[in-house]
Each structure stands twice: as C-alpha cells, then as structure tokens.
Image (tube, helix red, strand yellow):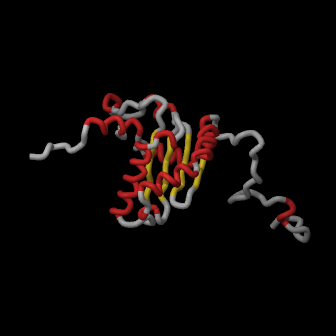
Amino acid sequence: MAPAHPRSSASSSSSFPRGRRIRKRADFVRIQNGGQRVTTRHLLILVAAPNDAAARGAGSRRASLAPEPVPGAPRLGLVASRKVGGAVARNRAKRLLREAFRRSPELFPERVDIVVILRTGAGALGLDDVLAELRSVVPVLRRKAREALAGGRPAAGRSGPPAVGRGAAPAADERGAEDPTGR
C-alpha cells in the first residue's frame, strides 16, 4: 500500500509557505499600481516594498490564523489571464514559476513583494526556460528592488524623459507654432 502523502520531509525546506505568498487583492492592486516593472518576453515582473501590514502579518480579521511572514524573504504573487492559454496551461505556468521561486531563491531580491504577470506564450515554457528568463533579468530585478525599497525613486542620474499621458499638457515644441492656444 502506498503512503497517503508521497511528499518527503526533505521537500519541506523548499516549500512555499503561506507567509511567502501574496494572497490579498489589495496587495496585488498596490503592487500593480506602484511597483517597479521588469519585463521579459513571457513575464512582467512587478517589484514593490512590502506594506507595514504585510510585513507584520496583520490586517486580517483572522489575525490568529494569519500566516506568519518569513522575515527578509520575498513574497510572490502570480497572475495568469486567458491569454496564456486554457486552465491547464495557466496552472502549469504558475506551477513552474512557483517551482523556480522555490528552487532558485538567489534569483529574487530579499525583503520585497513580487507579482509576476504571465504573458502570451508562457504556457508553453518549461522550467529551464522560466529559469533562463529570470536569470537574464537578475541585475535589473535587484536594481528595481533597491529603488522600490528606497521609496520608488529611480537611482541618481537615471531620469528619463517626462511622460506625456492623459491629462498632461504637451510640451511647447509639440504644440506647433501656428496654434498659440496649444489645441
């Protein structure tokens, strides 16, 4: 007769405890709105400093049942839309990312919250492909984590062009000389 749980006790050291997961919608929204972005072909990685409630493990109505956060360890959240594929492909891709997170903790910066949004084609990746994509952006990921922990300010000397988005007035040279009103 086979044992009820085929998992060995050796795998518990590389587990993915609840304290290392991002589970609340508010945390996902906070990270997606204010996180530092790192992109690869199949992944969009968002890095943000943890909020105080997440760092303490508080904020839950069931505070006594709340998972105990692992000090200094990054927390991971995964998002996969139907663009990735059907349910089987989405779940497989998320499972591979969790496995990469467990097996290669050196790829992920300490003390940050990370949300990985899977892009189209991620469902066809293997574990080696996922690890290769993550390894290719480790220096950028670490820099973005430092920026997030410093309060979201980019590193000194790395200022980009001003963004012109909705509600922003275009620069004077973009308005055109013939229309002084800027319309």
Front residue of this view, candidates 105 and 113: 105
Question: Which quadrant would residue 170 be assigned to in this image?
Answer: bottom right
Question: Which quadrant of the structure image shows residue 65?
Answer: top left
Q: Quadrant of the C terminus?
A: bottom right
| Front-lying residue, 13 or 47 | 13
Q: Is residue 39 left or right of residue 88?
A: right
Residue 167: percent from the left, percent from the top?
A: 70, 58
Q: Residue furthest right?
A: 177
Residue plotted at (46% across, 29% down): 71
In x, y percent, where is residue 104?
Answer: 45, 43
Query: In the picture shown, does residue 140 fall above or below 49?
Result: below
Q: Residue at x 40, y 48 (%)?
A: 98
In the image, what residue occupies the spot 29% across and 36% down? Answer: 10
Whole-percent x and y of residue 13?
35, 35
For the view shown, which residue lies furthest in the bottom direction? 178
Q: How many marks?
A: 0
Residue placed furthest toward the left:
1
Residue 1's place in the image compared with 175, above or below, is above
Residue 168 % position (x, y): 73, 57
On screen, residue 7 versus residue 30, left or right, reads left
